[in-house]
């Protein structure tokens, strides 16, 4: 390139980001350019300078260094420098010499890049158009955010995730029975909120023992990288707020609840979502709020979204449960009395829903329904259903709608979701095996004295410092607490027959032995767990890892991992009560309850370690008890009073509240025990019947609406089976410089090539990369293999980079066609909708960036409908960049005209795009609004701010969609060539 003159403006072909350069000096050999915006100076050889002269033409908008803009109309040259002539913003005729152009003028728009001769590879342009096309499709898919995670498609989880994540700032209690997948549901909700832009920052608070499990689940199943925060990490951040160091922060409740300074720091941050696992520990009573409750209460007042997770919501009593509901919605849950009263009404609603199935039928059923509805829309549906003239499809539709309306308007379902095994189905049987053992003399001595001497209990409580009835149930604890007794010198595990019984079972290769199986042992106390492990080691030479709340996280995870390892792992894991809560041990089918917990919900939590999704065997529950002991009486209470071992019943808390004290008093007295059991049974049956007819029935009906769940699953499957994904990925990997190699069995290995573009997730140059599969089932079977979907971070990163950047927004290709004369120019223009709106509106569900393609021949004839993108693309040939630049320079005027003409053609498409987005948005939001308004009349669980937020959202979306504009996104110049070229 020659003809340089000082003061001219040029742009670097390879480094357009440097901005507009000014020639400082030039001679026949070299040219020096100052790029003012980036304060860089470069000297090139004059003959091969990778520079393009910037020359604007009619219609271009240019900016002066002093800030004003000019729309170019004409230009003139004076001493080798261009002077642009045109109108400024006020319509005044002005001149702008090129030397006065702003250094910061950007050349990233397709038009500017093209006209300054910057062209990308032809296949980049292809990839750009395909990216826009797929992004548009995927963003509108109703399963977005639920399709990527590595999970089995389990209907009740999908239903809950879909229902909750579509709400504005969801605040709900996820209360499925133990092991049905609350963590997965919370993960799905979080994932969808993140992908749709409805949340950006989330804080997850879990018991210390579960931090690692959550970390791993979020990464492995949801590809979400979270920052795990503890005191050590926090200290490393010095004075800055450690909670600001990540978008997704995971912290242990034990640590945060005990640390007011860290709580204040957590509160000082902006969060969109707060997730609290094992929320039953957040205890509250009228006189005292526990530290956990108080901390979460403060955070919940500021954070818009809140997910509380617990399998046993009433474990700490109804008041505490109610107080947690109040955290979710203080306006709705303001009176416990009213809450209890409302419950009386649920039976009628549940009966009405059942009556629906029998309509059109008896007048009685009709009356039952009419009694619980007074809304015009519901009554009209009831008429349709009752009318024998209406056809079968009409009736089915009316039945479905009425059912939905009743559930929405009357239950607690909007705030609380509870799936039960009974409802979900397909769970294994639970079998109880009781072994009676003779109490050893050390325990007998105390028990005998307790029976003989009424006053001894008080004495024992003082002497041991233990509580009642724990002192009676946990005899080894009692023994340890009496260590001053000269007779109690031996460790308890030396003589406790439960230890030898366990050792024998572990070694037993017979049908009832454990020799070939993994065994989880749970004991109430940490000391019991530790002592038992010691006993197994000393007496039986067996290694049993222990898992309790006193261990560090690393130690706990090590113990759990040592147990989980199929090949080399230990046969047995000994846990304390609280230490194992929430843990996943479904690979094991034998649970030994070394002693029994006092609360029925705790019993359920124990069984829930094994009885979880993924358990493939019947669950064997082994309970060794001492004949005639208080422990045996407790066992009878559980079995005879409430069938506690057969299935979860969810009334344990009420029963415990009613009979906990009476039971404690009856533990030394056979006769009163029989009475307590009889009364317990009566209450159990009546509560169960009542709950099943009312609250439980509504919760069950609402926890999973199968039609919706099936729709979500179908939408996910559609994405899973999308044949376009592998094709797209292949093209994208090639362009981004990632090598892929088939490993067989539907698995491939992705590895960075030396040319790879930097910053792709999971792929760092010089490292191995990762293995991946498109198949959900293969990914579920192999933890080490990534699951590739449109939601995988690698795909999102590549697509995001293309859409947000300039990659492939200009190209030039040659077209060889016998019927086209050589040397003609065509322009393939891709326009894209732009609709600036806050991310939280999730506008993309109605109007994702939408591409409008316009193909023009040299005379401006629109060929778009005649020649498709793919039809054209496969006949194109690439061309060297230097030649492309020369071709463009030689046809600048023609190209300008085509760009202007293309814009007019594209604009004609805009109104229909805007209108259909508006229709879609209104249909969905008006439907949702109508539903919420009707709901709010009946069900105070609909918060006012939810309604207001939805109305605001509708109007903001309306305005945003209305303001949609089209912008040129990419342009490909096509030059026809003759046969021999
Ligand atoms: N959809 C799914 N696909 C694959 N695995 C699942 C799915 N749902 C749950 N699981 C597995 O089942 C187990 C139980 O799930 P999860 O831990 O979410 O249950 P939970 O209801 O939170 O249990 P808990 O009440 O004990 O806290 C976990 O190992 C989880 O990974």
Image (tube, grey):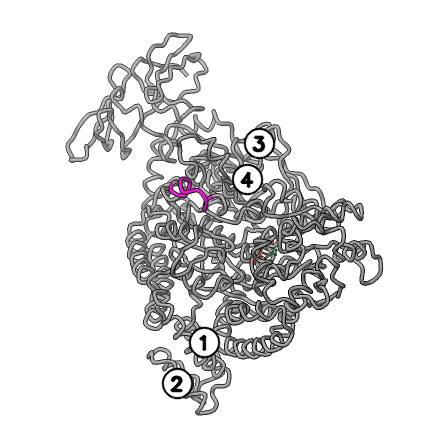
Can residue 426 be seen at all in this image of the molecule?
no
* Residue 363 on image: x %, y %: 44, 92
Q: Is residue 263 one of those drawn in magenta?
A: yes
Q: Nearer the viewer, mark 1 or mark 3?
A: 1
The tag earlier along the polypeptide, 2 or 3, is 2
Q: From the image, tell me which residue sits under label 1.
A: 403
The tag earlier along the polypeptide, 2 or 4, is 2
User: Ligand 1 within 8 A of label 2's CB?
Assistant: no
Q: Residue at 78% across / 47% down in the picture? A: 542
Give the crowd class for mark 3: few <14, some 14-19, many >=20 residues within 10 Å: some
Q: Nearer the viewer, mark 3 or mark 4?
A: 3
Can residue 436 be seen at all in this image of the molecule?
yes
Q: From the image, tell me which residue sits under label 2.
A: 383
Q: Which mark is residue 764?
A: 3
Q: From the image, tell me which residue sits under label 4.
A: 732
The tag earlier along the polypeptide, 1 or 3, is 1
């Amino acid at each position: 390139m020659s003809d340089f003159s000082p003061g001219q403006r040029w742009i670097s072909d390879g480094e357009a980001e440097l901005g507009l350069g000014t020639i400082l000096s030039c001679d026949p050999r070299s040219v020096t350019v100052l790029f003012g915006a980036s304060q860089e100076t470069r000297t090139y050889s004059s003959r091969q300078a990778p520079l393009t002269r910037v020359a604007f033409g009619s219609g271009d908008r240019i900016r002066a260094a002093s800030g004003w803009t000019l729309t170019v109309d004409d230009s003139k040259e004076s001493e080798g420098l261009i002077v642009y002539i045109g109108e400024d913003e006020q319509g005044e005729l002005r001149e702008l010499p090129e030397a006065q152009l702003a250094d910061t003028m950007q050349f990233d728009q397709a038009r500017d890049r093209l006209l300054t001769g910057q062209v990308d590879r032809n296949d980049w342009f292809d990839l750009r158009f395909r990216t826009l096309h797929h992004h548009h499709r995927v963003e509108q898919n109703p399963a977005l955010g639920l399709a990527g995670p590595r999970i089995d498609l389990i209907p009740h989880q999908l239903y809950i995730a879909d229902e909750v994540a579509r709400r504005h700032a969801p605040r709900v209690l996820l209360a499925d029975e133990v092991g049905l997948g609350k963590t997965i549901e919370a993960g799905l909700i979080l994932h969808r909120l993140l992908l749709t832009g409805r949340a950006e920052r989330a804080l997850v608070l879990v018991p210390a023992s579960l931090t690692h499990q959550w970390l791993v689940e979020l990464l492995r199943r949801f590809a979400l990288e979270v920052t795990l925060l503890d005191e050590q990490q926090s200290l490393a951040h010095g004075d800055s707020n450690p909670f600001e160091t990540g978008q997704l922060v995971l912290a242990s409740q034990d640590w945060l609840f005990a640390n007011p300074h860290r709580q204040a720091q957590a509160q000082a941050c902006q969060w969109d979502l707060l997730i609290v696992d094992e929320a039953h520990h957040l205890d509250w009573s009228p006189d005292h709020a526990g530290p956990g409750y108080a901390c979460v209460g403060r955070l919940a007042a500021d954070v818009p979204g809140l997910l509380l997770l617990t399998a046993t919501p009433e474990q700490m009593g109804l008041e505490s449960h109610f107080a947690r509901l109040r955290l979710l919605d203080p306006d709705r849950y303001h009176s416990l009395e009213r809450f209890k009263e409302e419950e009386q009404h649920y039976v009628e609603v549940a009966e009405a829903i059942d009556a629906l199935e029998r309509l059109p039928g008896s007048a009685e059923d009709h009356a039952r329904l009419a009694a619980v509805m007074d809304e015009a829309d519901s009554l009209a549906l009831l008429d349709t259903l009752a009318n024998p003239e209406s056809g079968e499809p009409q009736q089915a539709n009316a039945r479905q709608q009425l059912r939905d309306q009743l559930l929405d308007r009357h239950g607690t379902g909007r705030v609380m979701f509870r799936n039960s095994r009974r409802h979900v189905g397909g769970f294994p049987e639970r079998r109880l095996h009781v072994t009676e053992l003779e109490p050893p003399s050390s325990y007998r001595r105390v028990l005998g004295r307790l029976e003989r001497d009424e006053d001894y209990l008080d004495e024992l409580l003082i002497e041991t410092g233990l509580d009642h009835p724990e002192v009676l149930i946990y005899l080894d604890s009692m023994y340890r607490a009496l260590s001053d007794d000269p007779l109690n010198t031996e460790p308890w595990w030396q003589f406790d027959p439960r230890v030898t019984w366990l050792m024998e079972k572990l070694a037993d290769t017979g049908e009832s032995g454990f020799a070939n199986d993994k065994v989880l042992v749970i004991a109430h106390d940490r000391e019991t767990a530790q002592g038992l492990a010691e006993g197994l080691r000393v007496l039986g030479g067996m290694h049993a890892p222990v898992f309790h709340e006193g261990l560090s996280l690393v130690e706990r995870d090590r113990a759990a991992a040592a147990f989980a390892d199929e090949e080399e792992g230990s046969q047995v894991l000994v846990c304390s009560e609280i230490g194992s809560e929430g843990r996943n041990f479904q690979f094991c089918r034998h649970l030994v309850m070394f002693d029994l917990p006092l609360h029925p919900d705790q019993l359920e939590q124990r069984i829930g370690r094994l009885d979880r999704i993924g358990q493939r065997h019947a669950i064997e529950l082994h309970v060794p008890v001492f004949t005639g002991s208080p422990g045996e009486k407790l066992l009878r209470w559980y079995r005879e009073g409430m069938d506690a071992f057969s299935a979860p019943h969810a009334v344990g808390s009420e029963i415990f509240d009613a009979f906990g004290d009476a039971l404690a008093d009856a533990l030394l007295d056979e006769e009163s025990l029989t009475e307590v059991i009889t009364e317990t049974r009566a209450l159990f049956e009546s509560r169960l019947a009542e709950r099943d007819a009312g609250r439980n029935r509504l919760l069950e009906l609402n926890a999973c609406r199968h039609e919706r769940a099936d729709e979500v699953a179908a939408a996910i499957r559609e994405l899973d089976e999308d044949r376009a994904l592998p094709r797209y990925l292949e093209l994208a990997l090639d362009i981004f410089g990632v090598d892929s190699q088939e490993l067989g069995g539907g698995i491939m290995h992705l590895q960075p090539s030396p040319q790879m573009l930097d910053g792709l997730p999971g792929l760092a140059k010089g490292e191995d990369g990762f293995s991946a599969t498109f198949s959900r089932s293969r990914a579920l079977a192999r933890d080490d293999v990534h699951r590739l979907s449109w939601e995988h971070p690698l795909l999102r990163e590549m697509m995001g980079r293309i859409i947000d950047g300039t990659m492939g927004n200009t190209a030039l290709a040659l077209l060889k066609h016998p019927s086209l004369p050589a040397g003609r120019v065509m322009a393939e223009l891709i326009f894209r909708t732009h609709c600036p709106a806050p991310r939280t509106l999730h506008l993309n569900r109605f109007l994702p960036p939408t591409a409008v393609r316009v193909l023009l021949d040299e005379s401006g004839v629109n060929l778009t409908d005649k020649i498709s993108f793919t039809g054209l693309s496969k006949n194109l040939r690439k061309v060297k960049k230097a030649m492309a630049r020369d071709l463009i320079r030689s046809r600048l005027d023609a190209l300008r005209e085509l760009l202007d003409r293309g814009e007019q053609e594209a604009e004609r498409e805009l109104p229909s795009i805007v209108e259909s987005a508006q229709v879609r948005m209104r249909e969905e939001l008006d439907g949702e609004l109508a539903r919420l308004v009707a709901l709010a009349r009946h069900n105070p669980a609909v918060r006012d701010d939810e309604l207001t937020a939805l109305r605001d959202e509708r109007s903001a979306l309306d305005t945003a969609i209305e303001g949609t504009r089209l912008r040129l996104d990419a342009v490909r110049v096509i030059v026809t060539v003759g046969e021999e070229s």
